[in-house]
Image (cartoon, helix red, strand yellow):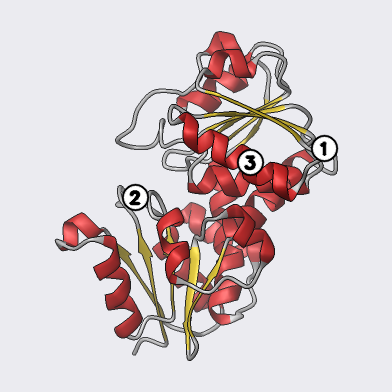
């Protein structure tokens, strides 16, 4: 018997470890959690139809991933002003008053950064990719004390839009935007990939190794695989690495608490995920 039904809506999610993570959290608490991968094109439906089907089909909640995080925010009630500012949602809970939206990419990135980098501020940061996860990470950088941020996107209007939203939210932060990652990376202490480049099915790297010289740390939001070319080359240049797996882990733990309020034994969960149980 299923106690809690959850799901993940996204493209290219066949290798996501989210189903395993949430089943393991359920096992820690004696609760049976079912967690479905929901790929709209494989279901022969668009995002709206899949989301509506979950809302009517007994789902407690959903995780939302690429490329739907900025789409779903228009279908949910968002109480947290940070999430409204971010303009993207990755966690949805269905309640009696309708679906509510949250962003655990934001809190997950802050937790992942603190676990790896301590209390130090991010410094000047170049972030490539200004979609759903990029927006969450950018707001996370502001929360971490970042005061200079270079945004990069091939769709310059998206980068400009995020820059404008950050200026409204945190006018003290200096934000620039560009379509040229190499130029934007010059003088940056932190380098961030928030594009799908490097993910299974999207090979390559968004920034050549030569452009990493002089930086201090790097983060990649991609976690399948966790050792992307971007991070391998950053490590080879001596940068401190924050893997996308850390974002995956922390955002998942935070989402689980929103879904069901279950306590999580984080060291035991890490070990079980590593074993692939």
In three-dimensional space, the C-alpha distance between marks 3 and 1, rounded to whole angstroms, equals 22 Å
Q: How many marks?
A: 3
Tag 3–tag 1 contact (CB < 8 Å): no
Kindly identify the residue that appears in the image at 61 percent across and 61 percent down.
Answer: 84
Instruction: Judge left or right: residue 106 versus residue 231.
Output: right
Identify the residue at image location x=85%, y=43%.
119
Instruction: For the residues labelled 3 and 2, say whether their Cβ atoms are less than 8 Å apart.
Output: no
Q: Position of residue 139 (x, y in %)?
A: 67, 47
As drawn, which residue projects farthest toward the top?
210
SS category of the residue bearing label 3: helix
Q: Quarter of the image holding residue 217?
A: top right
Q: According to the image, label 3 marks what residue?
A: 164
- Residue at 66% across / 57% down in the picture? 107
Does residue 114 lie above or below 28 as drawn? above
Which residue has dot 2 on it? Answer: 15
Residues at marks 1 and 2, CA–CA distance in whole angstroms: 33 Å
Q: Position of residue 206 (x, y in %)?
A: 47, 23
Residue 143 image position (x, y, % from top left): 76, 49
Q: CA distance from mark 3 to mark 2?
A: 35 Å
Helix, strand or loop status at disc 2 = loop
State which tag comes first along the sequence, 3 or 2: 2
Q: Where residue 146 sits in the image (x, y, percent)?
A: 78, 37
| Mark 1, other Cα within 10 Å: few <14 / some 14–19 / many ≥20 | some
Residue 4, compared with residue 173, is above or below; it is below
**N-term-proximal mark, 1 vs 2:** 2
SS state under label 1: loop
Left or right side of 120 for 135:
left
Q: Which residue is mark 1?
A: 121
As rendered, which of 200 and 156 lies closer to the eye?
A: 156
* Residue depicted at 60% across the width and 74% down the height: 257
Residue 27 appears in the figure: yes
């Amino acid at each position: 018997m299923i106690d809690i039904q959850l799901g993940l809506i996204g493209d290219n999610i066949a290798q996501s470890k989210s189903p395993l993570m949430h089943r393991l959290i359920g096992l820690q608490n004696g609760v049976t959690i079912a967690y479905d991968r929901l790929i709209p094109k494989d279901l022969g439906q668009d995002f709206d139809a899949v989301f509506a089907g979950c809302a009517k089909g007994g789902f407690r909640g959903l995780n939302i991933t690429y490329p739907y995080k900025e789409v779903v925010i228009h279908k949910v009630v968002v109480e947290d002003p940070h999430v409204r500012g971010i303009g993207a949602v990755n966690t949805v809970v269905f309640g009696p008053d309708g679906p509510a939206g949250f962003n655990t990419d934001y809190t997950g990135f802050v937790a992942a950064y603190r676990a790896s980098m301590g209390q130090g501020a991010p410094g000047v940061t170049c972030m490539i990719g200004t979609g759903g996860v990029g927006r969450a990470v950018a707001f996370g950088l502001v929360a971490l004390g970042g005061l200079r941020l270079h945004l990069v996107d091939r769709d310059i209007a998206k980068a400009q839009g995020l820059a404008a939203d950050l200026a409204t939210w945190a006018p003290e932060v200096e934000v620039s935007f560009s379509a040229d990652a190499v130029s934007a990376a010059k003088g940056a202490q932190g380098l961030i990939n928030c594009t799908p480049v490097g993910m299974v099915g999207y090979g390559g790297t968004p920034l050549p190794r030569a452009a990493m010289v002089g930086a201090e740390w790097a983060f990649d939001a991609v976690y399948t695989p966790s050792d992307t070319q971007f991070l391998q080359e950053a490590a080879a240049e001596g940068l401190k690495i924050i893997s996308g797996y850390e974002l995956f882990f922390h955002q998942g733990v935070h989402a689980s608490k929103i879904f069901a309020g279950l306590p999580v034994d984080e060291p035991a969960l890490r070990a079980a995920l590593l074993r692939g149980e």
